[in-house]
Image (spheres, rainbow, N blue to C red):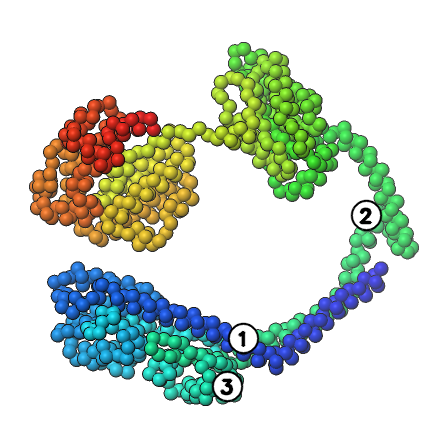
Amino acid sequence: MGRFYTKSLIMIFLVSGIPGLITGALVYEIAGGRMENELLQMHYKQIEQRSKIIDDQLGNLELLLSHWAFDNKFGSELQEMDFVRSFEKTIDLTKTLIAMQGSNAMVKQAELYVSRENSVLFNPEYGVLGEDSASRVYEPLLRGPAETFWTQWAFDAQRPNDKDLALVHRIPGGSLQPYGVLAFRFNSDKFADLLKTMTPYNDGETLLMQTTGDLYVSANGSAYDSPFAVALREKVESDGRTNGSFFLDWKGATYTVSFGSLSRIADEWIYVSAAPISNITSPVVTISKVIISVSLAVLIVAAALAWLASHRIYSPVRRLVTLFGETGNGQGREDEFALIERRWLSLHEESLELNTKLAKQLPQIKESFLHQLLQGYLYAYSEEDLLRRMEQLKWELTDRSLIVFYIQLIGIGAQEARFREGDEGLVTFAAVNMIGELADRRFEQSSTVNFHDLTAGLLAVVPNGEDYKASLQSFGEELTQSINQILNLRIAVAVSRPIARVSDVPLAYERAKQAAGYRNFANVNQIIDMDEVDSNGDAPEELRYPFTLERELIQALRTGREREAEELLESFLAALSCEGAKEYEVQQGMLHLLGNVQHAIMVSGIHPGRLFKGENLYEELSQIREPRRMLAWFRRKVLLPFQTELASRSDAQVKRMIEQAMIYLQENYMADISLDNCAEHAGCNPFFLSKAFKQVTGKNFIDYLTELRTDKAKELLRDTELRINEVAERVGYQHSYFNRIFKKMEGMTPSRYRELSRHG
């Protein structure tokens, strides 16, 4: 046997090593010849695909610039505008240019040039351009070859040799008499990085140039007249095609060159990508050499390990003979297996004897196994392992399902009970015996578990496809009657759904255990079906939403009272979480608050998408379960960005003034109050108060007062029994006008609102 395994191992190692040698040799041969042409075509297709991507990016830039050139912001009125007096328009132009500049990573600077007596240049900020710079740098752009064109231009009159690649569009768009230009000046490094995407290897060169030679860009920064660039241009020109590929020998190296054209506005560009052929073939050659080397090493190692492997393979037989207590006797292999056979028969007889003993101990073993299964201690076992264990314990589970019962005894300490505290173990033992006897009558297979704490578990087997509901009902009624009469106790039974997998039993038991909590607290018998529990669900509870805290929180945010806003947020969350509120109720309340805060942010003139950088705050908040984390997240993600933005837009003095005005309104909303007397209280003129009020709160003075009075009226309608005319007087309105304004704000009359709030 040893010699046979030795020969087998040698053959296995040879078979696994020789194909590797042959494969490496073939790969090495193919890589040196025929593969070059195929790789050339692959290189050309790859460069062509990447050139289309670059073409799309340049086309998008042209489309973007044309879109802005036709925008009304760059209309004819700019030629006569006083940019100093119209500073709001000037700031808006600067912001627009900054947005244009940030629209693409390659755009280094977006500029606006307006030609007039005192020429103006936005780059992107406003500035007056001297006559010399205007005439030498920007005026020639007005006389360019087309309305939109690409160019390499020196934008600094002091450094005429430093030219930037630029995209220029005259303004206004489509005008026959343009007065200025919009220009994108590109970052040469970023543009070079874009070209490098057409060079898939570290070595090589990529060029982009106009057919006229007026524009030239290199990915590696080589000059227009460098020897390699000249050689590439001459070869492309002599080829005579608009696109294609060829080999170029240069300084002892062979390059694969792919070229093509890009159609730009009123012009044609040519791209050229060159890479050393060795960069393409060297990985294949290297891999083939590695394959050959590895195959040779495997053969050498195989020869060294063959002898050792034969002994290792035969070692189990040797160990088995030694295990049976026998030593080598010089006989053949047959004698060894005959010895194994005899010893196996002896062990089989011993096994039968042990199985007989096991049958006597089987009930205790089954209970122990079932206890571990229900408690989840066997979670590491696979389904196959659990099935095998169940079969060993004489369970028959083919075409059958499992049902888990959780049984709880109730009323041990009651006056009419026969047992008192401390008798739990005795009572449970008696109940488990009764449960086992009744289950054996009703089910073909069953086993009980005694938890010794007035609870027990039962695992029953029911055939698939049969109506087991009647058996469950009869068993529950008989068990209830027996426990009531014999033990004078009440019982609660939770029954799971049928379970097809043994590994799902612990989960079903836990759900049944939790379902026992659905029982009525009264000392009555109950049988709880999990199907009914899952279909009914929890009864919805009334949502207690702190509207007043929400309004005060939003008001504190609007007026910049940061510390008070954080305290109100904490109080708001505490109000949501009190009195046994469920998790989903707290989450819904916080999501509702988030929506109202975002509405307040929008009303304040701040774009939430820009403020929160496009983050999905609703999704983030819905993933948080713990109140402390929810509070910290709301402070960091919502309050802090808004407070920071608001602080940058309104100075402290204006916010304090508006805060005083809002406090004055809250304290005197029921009186006859106007913008004039509120301005007098705040110490400013009405016009300034109205403008500042709108800027800080996002609402007009009268709208804010109306909303405040309406909210107060809604509170009185919900929480008091005051008549409608009394509510109107309390909030500063006459009865008839109050009805009209309330219906306009809420879409219903005060009486209807009170009726709906009482029934809601």
**Image position, residue 303 (x, y; %):** 76, 69
**Image position, residue 93 (x, y; %):** 21, 63
Q: Is residue 55 above or below residue 321?
A: below
Q: Which residue is mark 1?
A: 42
Q: Which residue is mark 2?
A: 323
Amino acid type of the residue tagged 2 in the rendering: Leu
Measure the alpha-carbon separation of dots 1 and 2: 65 Å
Q: Is residue 707 above or below residue 754?
A: below
Q: What residue sits 65% from the left and 24% below the top?
A: 471
Q: Which residue is mark 3?
A: 248
Q: Quadrant of residue 465?
A: top right
- 324 on left or right of 644: right
Front-lying residue, 157 or 350: 157
Q: Nearer the viewer, mark 1 or mark 2?
A: 1
Q: Quadrant of residue 592?
A: top left
Q: Which mark is residue 416?
A: none
Amino acid type of the residue tagged 1 in the rendering: Met
Q: What residue sits 38% from the left and 69% below the top?
A: 57
Crowding around mark 1 (Cα neighbors within 10 Å: few <14, some 14 to 19, many 20+) is few
- 483 on left or right of 618: right
Measure the alpha-carbon separation of dots 3 and 2: 75 Å
Q: Quadrant of the C terminus?
A: top left
Q: Are marks 1 and 3 in contact (CB under 8 Å)?
A: no
Precedes in sequence: disc 3 or disc 2 = 3
Amino acid type of the residue tagged 3 in the rendering: Leu
Q: What residue sits 80% from the left and 34% below the top?
A: 354
Front-lying residue, 82 or 746: 746
